[in-house]
Amino acid sequence: AKKATAYTIKSVHQDFDRLNLLTRDVRDNVRQAVDIMLKYDVDENDAEFQTQISDNPRDVTDPCQLVAEAVKGAMTQPTAEISTTLTKEAGMYERRQKQLEISQAEMVACAKDACSNLVQLRERTDEVVNRLQHLALGKQRKDGGVSAASNIASVVMGD
């Protein structure tokens, strides 16, 4: 259960002061609204006002539309310049990309060529090693069992 606070004369005066302040604010705002309406409101039966109104009113354009047109007009030139600059930049990047692709294709071709040359070199090296082993074995048989290592060394040295 909520504990009830004591309501004193002082709290009543505070509440009335607050109510008075809020009422004064509302009253002042209403007065300001009335003053604004009286300032801009016109009597349609006023003869002087009637003479100020033209029988052929000019085309009144919405202020928002005027602002939009002004912004559009102001932005047309920078937009065109930005578009031109971006087009030039994109062209430069495209050319650079094509150059890089050509260089990459050349490097891939060189790498494939080097790989092919290394494969051929490996095949020839294997042939030479096999030939040397065959000669060493033949020399070993011919010499009748002498150390194979010395035979291989002599074959390699050309003895």
Image (tube, helix red, strand yellow):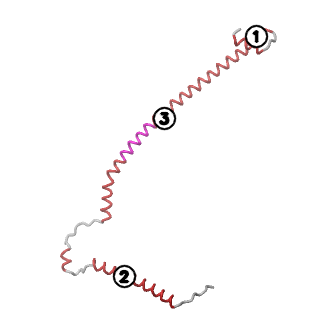
Q: Earlier in the sequence, mark 2 or mark 1?
A: 2
Sequence-first tag of 2 and 3:
2
x and y, in percent, of residue 109 in the image? 53, 28
Q: Is mark 1 on a helix, strand or loop?
A: helix
Looking at the image, residue 154 sits to the left or right of residue 44; the answer is right
Residue at x 78%, y 12% (from the top left corner): 140
Amino acid type of the residue that numbered disc 3 sits on in the rendered structure: Glu
The percent coordinates of residue 103 (x first, y second) are 49, 32
Amino acid at dot 2: Asp
Residue nearer the viewer, 8 or 73 = 8
In percent of width and height, residue 33 lies at 34, 79
Which region is colored magenta?
83-96
The mark nearer the N terminus, 1 or 3, is 3
**Residue found at the very far front of the displayed protein:** 10
Q: Name the residue under label 1.
A: 139
Task: Determine which of the numbered discs, if any, sits on residue 69 in the image.
Answer: none
Q: Quadrant of residue 88?
A: top left
* Residue drawn at the location 71% of the way across and 15% of the way down: 132
Eyeballing the image, is 5 above or below 78? below
Q: Name the residue under label 2.
A: 28
Q: In which quarter of the image is the C terminus?
A: top right
Look at the magenta stretch and give its main secondary structure. helix
The circle on residue 101 is 3
How crowded pointer 3 is (Cα within 10 Å; few <14, some 14-19, many 20+) is rated as few
Seen in the picture, residue 53 relative to 120 is either above or below; the reply is below
Residue at x 22% of width, y 69% of height: 57
The answer to whether the residues at label 1 and label 3 have Cβ atoms under 8 Å apart is: no
Write down the quadrant of residue 90 in the picture.
Answer: top left
How far is the residue under mark 2 from the one under mark 3? 77 Å
Instruction: Determine whether, in the image, residue 148 is placed left or right of residue 36.
Output: right
